[in-house]
Image: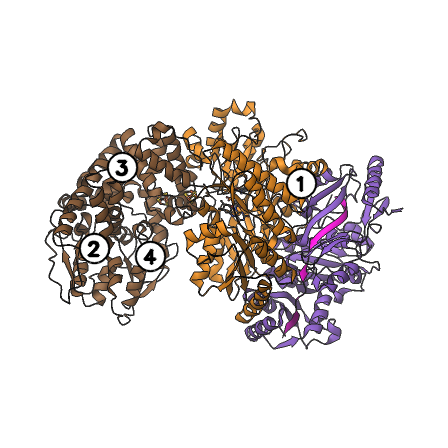
Amino acid sequence: MSEAIKFLEPRKNVMSRRRAIIEDLADLLPPECLVHEPRELVPFETDAFVAYRRLPLAVALPKTTEQVAAVMKYCHRYGVPVVPRGAGTSLSGGAIPQEDAVVLGLSKMSRILDVDPANRTATVQAGVTNLSISDAVSPEGFFYAPDPSSQLACTIGGNIGMNSGGAHCLKYGVTTNNLLGVKMVLVDGTVIDLGGKHLDAAGYDLLGLVCGSEGQLGIVTEATVRLIAKPEGARPVLFGFDTSEQAGACVADVIGSGIIPVAIEFMDKPAIEICEAFAHAGYPLDVGALLIIEVEGSEAEMDAMLKSIVEIANRHDVKTVRESQSATEAALIWKGRKSAFGATGRIADYICMDGTVPLGKLSYVLEKTSEIVERFGLRVANVFHAGDGNMHPLILFNANDPEDAARAEEAGNEILKLCVDVGGCLTGEHGVGIEKRDLMRHQYSDTDLNQQMAVRAAFDADWLLNPSKVFPIEGRPAA
Amino acid sequence: MTLIPNTETDAAYVIRNAAAQGTTLAVCGGDTRSGFGNAVAFEDVLSSRGLSGIVDYDPAEMVMTVKTGTPVTEVEAALAANRQMMAFEPMDHRGIMGTTGEPTIGGVFAANASGPRRFVAGAARDSLLGIRFVNGRGEIIRAGGRVMKNVTGLDLVKLLAGSHGTLGFLTEVTFRVLPVPETAETIVISNLDDAAAARAMAVSMALSVEVSGAAHLPQTVRSRFLGGQLPEGEATVLRLEGLKASVAVRSEKLTSEMSRFGPVSRLGPDDSRRLWQEVRDVTPYAGMPKKPLWRVSIAPSAGHQLVAALRLEAGIDAFYDWQGGLVWMQMEADPEAELLRRYVRGLGGGHATLVRAPERLRLATPAFEPQGDAVAALSARIKLKLDPAGIFSPGKMAGV
Amino acid sequence: MQTNFTAEQLADPHVAESEKILRRCVHCGFCTATCPTYVTLGNELDSPRGRIYLIKDMLENGRPADAEVVTHIDRCLSCLACVTTCPSGVDYMHLVDHARVHIEKTYKRPLMDRLIRQLLATILPYPKRFRAALLLAKVGRPFAPLLKGFPALKPVAAMLDLAPKGRIKAYDPNHVHPRPPEAKRRGRVAILSGCAQPVLDPGINEAAIRLLTRLGVEVVLPEGEGCCGALVHHMGKEDPALDFARRNVNVWTREIENGGIDAIIITASGCGTTIKDYGHMLRLDPAYADKAARVSALAKDITEYLVTLELPTAEAKGLTVAYHSACSMQHGQKITMAPKTLLKNAGFAVRDPAEGHLCCGSAGTYNIMQPEISAQLKVRKVKNIEATRPDVIATGNIGCMTQIGTGTSIPIVHTVELLDWAYGGPKPENVA
Ligand SMILES: Cc1cc2nc3c(=O)[nH]c(=O)nc-3n(C[C@H](O)[C@H](O)[C@H](O)COP(=O)(O)OP(=O)(O)OC[C@H]3O[C@@H](n4cnc5c(N)ncnc54)[C@H](O)[C@@H]3O)c2cc1C
Ligand code: SF4
Ligand code: SF4
């Protein structure tokens, strides 16, 4: 386990009252909603960012907003930190607990509450998975647009926490652009409603602030999201290039030409091989880089768009162009892409970077990334949302070798700093979490960060909500 | 006194001074939306006019960075030269507000001013990628950035968008732009009453034709659009945009689906453009400064119910944008704020903003929808965190 | 994922294997979404990722199993949906097998639990005992509600509930008489009789044999085979499980070496999964490793074998069939298309119920040991099946037939019974 990033020191007054706190929580929750046996706490010690682990004090798995409120009220009163958790698929360690914290898991709140086709909205509990929203509204001809690759498992609460994106966000926007309202429990247990089936805020855009706040402003228990009518048709097309540079330049030109496909995904050679081995999607194996470009609409529309894209690709010496021939094939192409990270586990441990860069800098950053990773004696696979410049270098390493792990972490930090230096940012969709917390000062000045922390304090003055995350610990204003 | 700093540093200096002395400031750009919000007193005006110019525009990246005092026309001209646009169609408030200044880009974002495409393409806040502003302490703050995807830290960008100058003085905005669609056309369905129109619009939005504008113009306003050229009766209008080949196919499909609701006619690209600009700028209610004007955001299927209910109790005139979810409502005399807001709550919630009213009524009516206690308290705390001395138009927005 | 084992621990081949499996897990959490127990209980401890972590912690620390770990491992259905979902190829099946053996070796279960397990292990694998027990169960059924009042006795009540309500046919091991092939000889296969299935529904193998014979396949019923061992294997009773496996390997090896067989046909996918794993189960037994591997390679589900025969297209029956893919079929053996292709080809309108990846809650003895979770899964499964408005439900596993059959009035049959009917056999009794 890595130790480079520090968590907050456990609060002594909390640790010493551990037994009492558990007993009190037991009064607030049904027995199956509280986990406290030390051995049962172990599986909650991390999320999908496994490099860091901390055993929580207890895990509460409430079934209702009222129970969430009761737990919050209690924890607020006794100064017990709380770490919200959805499906625990965060890649930045957003859901990793700390020793003095109660993990508040929303996994038992997984009901779809309302599907409203006339208003194109769905209201769901926070523990509902991203994909099951689309599944539930599909019979009505709709879908929920943001589609993180983890959509099978990740929850809408977690998506709101991280303002998650996905392949199809190029056209439809990320979570914050598709979120209409939330029911939320504030740190002191007060329940508030923000937004609803209508658009825009009555006053300050608190919903916009909550989205992407990584569980630091409150616990979301319900969400109302915008639905979109399913397109008439959709066609993912594979474009194979000899080099990553060509593929990167092609992306910039497609977007620059005014064409906005629904998705432009990028894979380099290692990534293609990994994904093909798992999904058998028919990705070309004789190319150096691959773009999956999806167009949608009527046949005529797709044809017209594709024609222009193919022309641009030709200018970049595209080697192969393959259209999916059937719905099954299209599904496989996406399955391969969406399983990319998991499938990488077949060959090595990895950490996944998430910097975003201006499109014009894609090729340059790809090249530099390879250089950096090589310098550390490691390997890298790139698979990411190219259309919006959101890069995901997967740095491959051996987790059982502490030195290898430390090198991977260092290489990752260099890559992220590079992203910031070329005009991008540290994280496009995975959130700061614990992983990028100490790099925040590379992107923001102290004043910038202080302002963010001040606004955070308007919600949680005592730093009880997910307190080890997002903001560097050194230099935090006193509570 | 009107303060017109020419640099961000100057602005910070001015604000630091104001904070030190407790001088209240009203932030303004082109002064075209100054009548917004609660009528509150202030000592000085802080204008963004001195901060003008496009800082950076890379059409290939579809991102533009502009100083906030830059006129919207300048921004639009630069974009048009590259066949690009602001997807959220910022509305021009001069008509309804009876103002004459030059709208600035800062004002657009500070008011989160969005037009007909908002319900599918997002509001101004959704296009806004990054900002620079001076907070009430006189500190220069940068938030967001210039890339489309960015979840690095708390999203102060969204918070500042639509804060009407009460949280900080925006000095620079970076936003996403989109290509101008190759063509546009509008399907007009005639003679639908409000309820039938709501149904028709809902059906159109469930079709895979990508309607990018859905408005219903009842009889009372219909003739005030396109110089009276729309067909007789009520007009329910649906816009399609995109590649020519694609619009043709979608228009076919939409027309055939809508024919079961009523007679369908079509508007070509030029009329279409003009019509939606008029919808955007609420042309029918322009030039009537005495009549209170409400902007109500509500669930699309509830818009017409709200109007129907109010009609029984007050003299109102209304038309609908955003599939029925945006109701522009002009009152004969009294704003009937309480009545209106009670109905909005009864219909599942939303918010009613009093956009225009004579001075006397403005003083008596909260312009923004009052919030529940907890949310109001939160908002007040946030205001304090950005503007501890309370110098930016205190009281302008619902108690903050 | 990082692991923490000493070289000494890794010297044990079972631990070494588990370590390898654990190393592959990247903790992405995808598998939680398709796990029936997580979907039902909403607690990560009852999810694959949670169980993997519990097992990892237990093995790394070389600890005996404890009540908590046992609770969550016991709740696992072994449906293997997680294996289908996992992009990283984590072999959860063999990990949980190892964990179960570890539990059996190091953990003393409460008395009642032990007794019930022993009871099941002594009765179910033996057809005669099982039939006798079912007859007794009929007498005992009125007491089921009473028993439910005692937590420890819930499994007994569940057992009584599950016993068939109708007549229990006499068990006659020679009930099905293989005949020489009727058409031009196309192959020779052995068919597994097994243990519980011939008692609960002898008609399944009868249909399979009729169909195969008609198609020109010689079917043999080698003397001496029996329960595949799955039942005790899933209880972590390693020695008896391996004994069952060895016995069957012996029997089939004899047959392979004498008459030669093209396949070992299995009509219960639960058994199929286990027999296909004999090669792995006996890999450390030098006397058996090769033979077992050969047996596993020959093991075929009946539908898997039938698709190779290229059956003619039959005319439409006007009957809608909801096809329920047993977990052991779709996840255990990865057979997804064959049964549906065969049914469609045979003239049935085939429907895929929603949430097809979720277990019906049968899972061997699971509906007896974990009646509450099992019942919830059953309700969910039946709801999804009924939503397709089928005339009949088809599936390839006797356990699912019993489980789903107690939750719906729609007739449920084995896929092969429909196929037999479509190609000239009798109409299944319960199909209207
Ligand atoms: C293989 C893989 C692929 C991925 N692909 C993508 C991708 O394409 N795009 C993308 O954006 N992300 C991706 N992710 C990252 C991750 O899935 C997202 O961040 C997701 O939104 C997390 O959801 P979750 O339910 O797992 O939340 P968790 O990981 O449990 O929590 C995430 C954060 O949200 C907070 N939180 C959770 N629930 C609530 C709540 N109800 N109220 C308040 N705060 C809450 C937590 O405290 C934490 O800070 C991927 C992850 C994996 C493992
Ligand atoms: S085998 Fe089934 S029940 Fe067990 S962990 Fe895997 S998915 Fe869950
Ligand atoms: S899906 Fe596979 S890799 Fe991911 S957590 Fe589950 S077992 Fe581990």
Q: Which residues are magenta?
A: B164-189
Q: CA distance from mark 3 to mark 4?
A: 28 Å
Q: Is the residue C307 above or below the residue B169 in the image?
A: below
Image quadrant occupied by the C terminus of chain C: bottom left
Magenta highlight on residue A136 = no
Marks 2/3: CA distance? 28 Å
Residues tagged by mark 2 and mark 3 found on one chain of the structure: yes
Alpha-carbon neighbours of circle 3 within 10 Å: few (<14), some, or many (≥20)?
many
Q: In terms of secondary structure, where does tag 1 sit?
A: helix
Letter of the chain that mark 4 sits on in the rendering: C
Q: Position of residue C300 (x, y in %)?
A: 24, 54
Contact? badges 2 and 1 (CB < 8 Å): no
Q: Which residue is mark 2?
A: C263
Q: Which is more toward the observer, C205 or A366?
A: A366
Asked if A293 appears above or below A299 in the picture, the reply is above
Disc 4 versus disc 2: nearer the observer? 2
Q: Mark 3 belongs to which amino acid?
A: Gly
For the point 34% across and 39% down, which residue is it? C95
Q: Sequence-wise, which precedes: disc 3 or disc 4?
A: 3
What amino acid is at disc 4? Answer: Thr
Instruction: For mark 2, give the secondary structure.
Output: strand
Which chain comes out orange in the rendered image? A
